[in-house]
Image (cartoon, coloured by chain):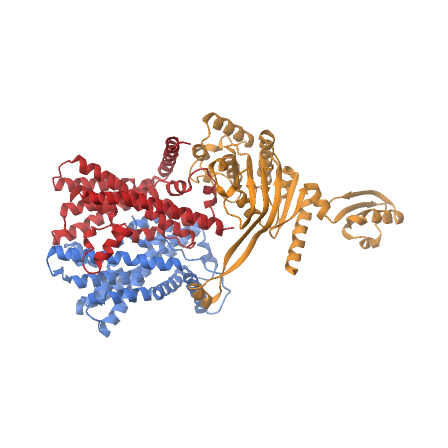
């Protein structure tokens, strides 16, 4: 039995078709036209207890909608889901007590008050026993290094500090499932790393199940072994992180150092990325790497050679671009 | 959780919310003072109006001068209580829907209606309750009212019912903003709607006004909100009306809750 | 409690429009965009209209009870029917003179620094706001025409027929004064935002007070002297009281002439005041930075 299970989740909603021009606006006063939007078109997956999974996809692919369905904020049009053995959209208190959703762009803390006050309120709402609350709070503030900031009004904190406070609030009641929507959006690298480390430590300590979306592959690489890739509402990949590159990274980077200047016809093997002095980097199709290397070694004297996987960032953005093109063509 | 422990928990949360809003209010003292002075100004305007009217007339719809003054005080206190506890929260609801900040509130393991409508206390309106009570006390003094435990108890009960009914109506109006995303004027809608409760219901007399008065007494019972408690205290004590008010309170609280939950459901299935 | 005008309405940020040769063209574009924006209110508007009727109903009933209680035909020169007509007419006056969100908007632009765009773009802030407001008012008046026609149709018995052409002309003039005084008064209040960042609170006080001193709540004549005479010297009466009494034909001859002259004078005063405050405010703003 998985911790999070989604079975053929679908979400279609109606959006008002805005009419342009004066006549259109007048008509809109009496009659509106709607457009069906398929936000999520049949998504299935299972996440086991203690897993940390990344949910990748371009903007508007359906990530946030899926997270909202899993947290019970919205009803699916069809399909089924179980989170912690609950149907999320029944929203039982016993379910809501056991999970957290953090949205990077949303602020849940009281703006004008110190975070400590919001935490107190949180304690009341979640009925956290005092001792447990004190323990968790000191553990989390220690982990994030923000002991001194909890007494300061939230509006005076920097974006990164605020996000840390949000994270503390989300973890205070020791959720067993944690859903994170862009937790590091807009943060600088230092704050990002800090939050990644905190999540990792917390995960190791408490074995929480995490599903996170992020635009930063750095987050994904630091935290997750498994990724789900979604585009246009459909799951196009579910497997280990390394597999993404294998599956979608069609080229490898062949880096060469020649004795003397590189030959002139290198373009015939693949895309020439760099050519400087004795160095030359070529992007070569995965299947042809061995052949290309053999051919080059046969004709020229090579001092050094290495074959590298392309960076995840690049692979992912290519996947999205191609899916986009395919979608537009269809 | 048994009902007693449940209500104890909600009371604790309410106390924490009250304490937080108070400390927030104290951080912006200037604002607080301005708010209070606007309210004082309002009371002054209402009293000026009352003075002008009674300078030329001895009674309005069967209410004599001190009785009417009591009515004004009762309205001011009741409305102040409503504005202090619920108006800001309900007014903010459409904004929560529009920005999607509502989501965070819906995730909490707590009753949604409670959290959304009781989140903040507008302490700036708290003095209204005292000012209104002061006006009522002055009116009682002017008419040399004698203490009567039955009337006083009935007044307190019907006053509480009046607050509950007004709250229920406000929740009904608030729920509408789920469908009217551009609506940002609950404050205005409330002002217009509550104008029905501002005067004695006896003014609804005559050919077309009487049915209208009946409509707003029995069908959409906004007229009874201030009328019944004020009547009970300084005019005729009518047990039937008090009973009717109790029934109306229960019914409206139930209906408004159903409608609010229905509105939230609709929000859940419409958004993405 | 806050009067209905407290509902804040913010103008949308002006679009940057290329350097068109004619200022007129530029403002026409703004006008059109604002018009469209107003049309998209819908259910909101319908419910709002229904609710708007309620206070009028209670007002009519209340005054009937007051006249019945007093046992007199006329109070301070107003018969019952005139009183109701007056109160209905003040709503028309306020339709022209109320400027929801104007001062608050100006203050917010100063506070958030978006006021800079008027210093960068070839556009005058007061001019822009004025055009936006006129567009808003025109749509509002068009949209309100049917409900108001209905209301006045239902309430026609409170009026002694239609006033003659001359009175209508004077009424139109009075309404124009109501708009100008209302706009430039509120704009001047908004300019205070250059000096004090928090004007919303000041605004609430002004608005609340205005509800009474403009004669929106009851004819100023009903107040005891010296109050009624004093309030008639102040500019606020032009936002509600004056147009209504002009329509009712209560201001005639010399009184009317003096009233109109006063209105023009106050208009000029606030136009100049808002300009001066704007200039000084901008100078102060650029000196101290945003």
Task: Please give the letter of the chain rendered in orange.
Answer: A
Please identify the quarter of the rendering in which residue B238 is found. top left
- Considering every residue shown, the one lying at the far top of the view is A131
Residue A59 visible in this rendered orientation of the protein: no
- Say whether residue C207 is left or right of residue A222: left
Chain B's colour?
red
Q: Is residue A136 above or below residue C201?
A: above
Note whether B195 is above or below C133 in the view shown.
Answer: above
Q: Residue furthest bottom?
A: C165
Residue A142 appears in the figure: yes
Image quarter hosting the N terminus of chain B: top left
Q: Which of A201 and C49 is in front in this view?
A: C49
Along the line of sight, the residue nearer the viewer: A14 or C99: A14
Asked which quadrant contains residue B154, the reply is top left
Spot the residue most to the right. A298
Q: Residue at x 34, y 48 (%)?
A: B170
Please state if B163 lies on the left or on the right of B101 as rendered: left
Q: Looking at the picture, does residue B188 appear above or below residue C80?
A: above
Q: Which chain is in blue here?
A: C
Q: Residue A83 location in percent, x, y?
A: 55, 39
């Amino acid at each position: 039995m998985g911790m999070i299970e989604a079975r053929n989740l679908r979400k279609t909603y109606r959006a008002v078709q805005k009419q342009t021009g004066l006549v259109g606006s007048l008509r809109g006063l009496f009659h509106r036209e709607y457009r069906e939007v398929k936000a999520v078109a049949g998504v299935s997956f299972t996440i086991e207890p203690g897993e940390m999974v990344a949910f990748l996809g371009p903007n508007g692919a359906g990530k946030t909608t899926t997270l909202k369905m899993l947290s019970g904020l919205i009803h699916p049009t069809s399909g089924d889901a179980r989170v912690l053995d609950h149907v999320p959209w029944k929203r039982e208190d016993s379910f809501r007590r056991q999970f957290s959703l953090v949205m990077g762009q949303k602020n849940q803390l009281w703006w004008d008050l110190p975070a400590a006050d919001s935490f107190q309120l949180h304690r009341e709402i979640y009925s956290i026993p005092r001792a447990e609350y004190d323990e968790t709070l000191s553990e989390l503030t220690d982990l994030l290094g923000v002991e001194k900031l909890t007494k300061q009004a939230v509006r005076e904190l920097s974006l990164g500090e605020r996000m840390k406070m949000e994270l503390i609030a989300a973890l205070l009641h020791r959720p067993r499932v944690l859903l994170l929507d862009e937790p590091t959006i807009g943060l600088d690298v230092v704050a990002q790393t800090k939050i990644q480390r905190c999540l990792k430590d917390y995960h190791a300590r408490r074995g929480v199940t995490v599903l996170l979306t992020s635009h930063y592959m750095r987050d994904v690489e630091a935290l997750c072994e498994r990724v789900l890739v979604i585009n246009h509402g459909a799951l196009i990949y579910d497997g280990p992180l390394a597999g993404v590159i294998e599956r979608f990274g069609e080229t490898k980077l062949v880096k060469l150092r020649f004795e003397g200047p590189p030959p002139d016809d290198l373009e015939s093997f693949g895309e020439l990325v760099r050519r400087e002095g004795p160095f030359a980097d070529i992007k070569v199709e995965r299947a042809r790497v061995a052949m290309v290397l053999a051919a080059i070694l046969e004709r020229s004297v090579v001092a050094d050679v290495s074959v590298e996987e392309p960076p995840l960032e690049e692979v992912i953005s290519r996947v999205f671009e191609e899916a986009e093109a395919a979608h537009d063509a269809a | 959780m048994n009902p007693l422990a449940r209500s104890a928990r909600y009371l604790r949360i309410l106390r924490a919310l009250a304490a937080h809003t108070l400390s927030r209010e104290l951080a912006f003292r200037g604002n607080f003072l301005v708010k209070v002075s606007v309210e004082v100004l309002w009371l002054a305007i209402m009293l000026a109006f009352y003075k002008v009217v009674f300078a030329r007339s001895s009674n309005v719809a069967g209410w004599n001068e001190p009785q009417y003054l009591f009515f004004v005080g009762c309205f001011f206190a009741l409305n102040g209580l409503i504005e202090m506890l619920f108006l800001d929260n309900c007014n903010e609801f459409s904004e929560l829907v529009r920005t999607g900040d509502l989501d965070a509130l819906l995730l909490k393991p707590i009753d949604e209606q409670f959290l959304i409508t009781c989140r903040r206390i507008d302490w700036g309106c708290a003095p209204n309750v005292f000012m209104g009570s002061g006006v009522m006390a002055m009116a009682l003094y002017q008419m040399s009212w004698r203490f009567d435990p039955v009337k006083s108890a009935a007044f307190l009960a019907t006053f509480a019912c009046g607050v509950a009914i007004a709250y229920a109506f406000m929740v009904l109006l608030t729920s509408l903003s789920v469908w009217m995303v551009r609506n940002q004027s609950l404050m205005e809608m409330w002002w217009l709607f509550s104008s029905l409760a501002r005067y004695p219901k006896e003014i609804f007399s005559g050919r077309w006004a009487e049915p209208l008065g009946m409509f707003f007494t029995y069908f959409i019972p906004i007229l009874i909100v201030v009328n019944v408690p004020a009547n009970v205290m300084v005019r005729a004590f009518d047990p039937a009306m008090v009973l009717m008010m109790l029934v109306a309170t229960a019914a409206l609280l139930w209906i408004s809750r159903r409608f609010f939950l229905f509105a939230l459901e609709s929000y859940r299935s419409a958004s993405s | 409690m806050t009067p209905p005008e407290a509902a804040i309405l913010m103008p949308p940020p002006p679009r940057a429009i290329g350097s068109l040769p004619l200022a007129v063209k530029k403002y026409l574009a703004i006008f059109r965009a604002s018009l469209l924006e107003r049309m998209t209110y819908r259910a909101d508007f319908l419910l709002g209209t229904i609710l708007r009727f309620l206070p009028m109903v209670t007002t009519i009933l209340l005054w009937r009870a007051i006249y019945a209680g007093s046992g007199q035909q006329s109070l301070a020169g107003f018969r019952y029917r005139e009183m109701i007509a007056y109160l209905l007419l003040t709503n028309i006056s306020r339709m022209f003179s109320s400027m929801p969100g104007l001062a608050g908007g100006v203050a917010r632009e100063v506070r958030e620094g978006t006021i800079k765009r008027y210093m960068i773009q070839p556009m005058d802030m007061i001019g822009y706001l004025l055009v936006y407001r006129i567009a808003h008012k025109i749509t509002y008046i068009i949209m309100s025409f049917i409900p108001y026609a209905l209301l006045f149709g239902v309430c026609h018995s409170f009026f002694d027929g239609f006033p003659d052409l001359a009175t209508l002309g004077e009424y139109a003039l009075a309404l124009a004064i109501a708009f100008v005084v209302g706009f430039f008064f509120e704009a001047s209040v908004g300019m205070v935002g250059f000096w004090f960042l928090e004007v919303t609170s000041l605004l609430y006080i002004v608005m609340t007070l205005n509800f009474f001193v403009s004669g929106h709540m009851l004819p100023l004549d009903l107040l005891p002297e010296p109050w009624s005479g004093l309030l008639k010297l102040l500019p606020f009466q032009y936002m509600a009281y004056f147009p209504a009494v002009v329509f009712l034909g209560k201001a005639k001859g010399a009184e009317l002439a003096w009233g109109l002259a006063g209105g023009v004078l106050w208009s000029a005063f606030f136009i100049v005041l808002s300009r001066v405050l704007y200039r000084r405010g901008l100078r102060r703003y650029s000196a101290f930075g945003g």
